[in-house]
Image: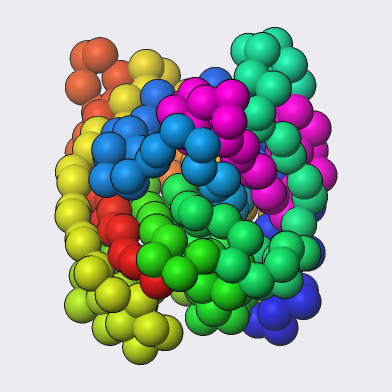
Amino acid sequence: MDPNLQRRVQRYGWDKATEFYESFWEDQLSPAHEKLQAMLEVNEGDHALDIACGSGQVTFPVANKVGVGGHVIGTDLSDKMIELASKNAISKKIPNATFQQMDAENLIFNDQHFDIVYTSLGLMYFPEPIKALNEFKRVLKDNGQLGIAVWGNRKRCGWAEVFEIVDKRVASEVCPMFFQFGNKLLMEKTLKGIGFGNVQLEIIQTKLKYNTDEEAYGAAFAGGPVALAYNKFNNDVKHEVHEEYLHSIREYRSSNGYEIPGEFLICTCIK
């Protein structure tokens, strides 16, 4: 897919998903967010950059750690996500977290500006991830820390059929490189090739828990990366994709709902 088209798909897709994102994904993504926070060495007074910050699920804990002498800027391609994160900062009374709409591959910050740069479950969506990683390195101070969380191996993510289900109904792939960096060897090789050192990687397993069919397919379609395409489907097609997706996850259903397996790769490294 053309990178500019992919950016538009992600920008306006996440605008569509914002309404449903927190209710469908906050708990399900927390293992990855919490592990990344644990691996990052955050100190009081640090200045941090949260790329693809979404509604601020990692921004706010990091802001609390850097304290009143520090600051966290959250950026996201989606205007609606930035609006939601800004409202959350006010409601949570966290003044040292601010948010800006921005492309991760074209950061509007000076060189060597931040002590920490991180992206929690954002790298998979960037059309040109190497360009983004070089931008992260540029804005990091010498010896600054980079943190990344991505989804892991496709075969260990039981919800992954959602992409194939949508892709066969649209003109081009929605997230063509989604699982690319879920490979530990590729992630390590890429980061070292860009010039990062002391690469630390961990894989964690998780379960995505949903109580009903509606929650399971709502998360997959309305609250996630395929939201733009999904919102263009008519009601008949929406019913088709719901049924097809539920069939793909049927083995994970029990009397209590769904427990869909997933995997995250978490890593940190030093500039």
- Residue 120 makes an appearance in the image: yes
Q: Position of residue 262 (x, y in %)?
A: 27, 45
User: Which residue occupies 77% across, 46% down?
Assistant: 100
Q: Position of residue 231 (x, y in %)?
A: 74, 45
- Residue 57 makes an appearance in the image: no
Indicate whether 39 appears above or below 256: below
Residue 62 magenta-highlighted: yes
- Left/right placement of residue 252 relative to residue 96 reads left
Residue 209 magenta-highlighted: no
Indicate whether 112 appears above or below 25: below
Q: Position of residue 125 (x, y in %)?
A: 56, 63
Residue closest to the eye, 6 or 155: 6
- Looking at the image, which residue sits at the far bottom? 193
Indicate whether 155 appears above or below 56: below
User: Which residue occupies 66% across, 12% down?
Assistant: 93
- Left/right placement of residue 3 relative to residue 46 reads right
The magenta span reads 58-86
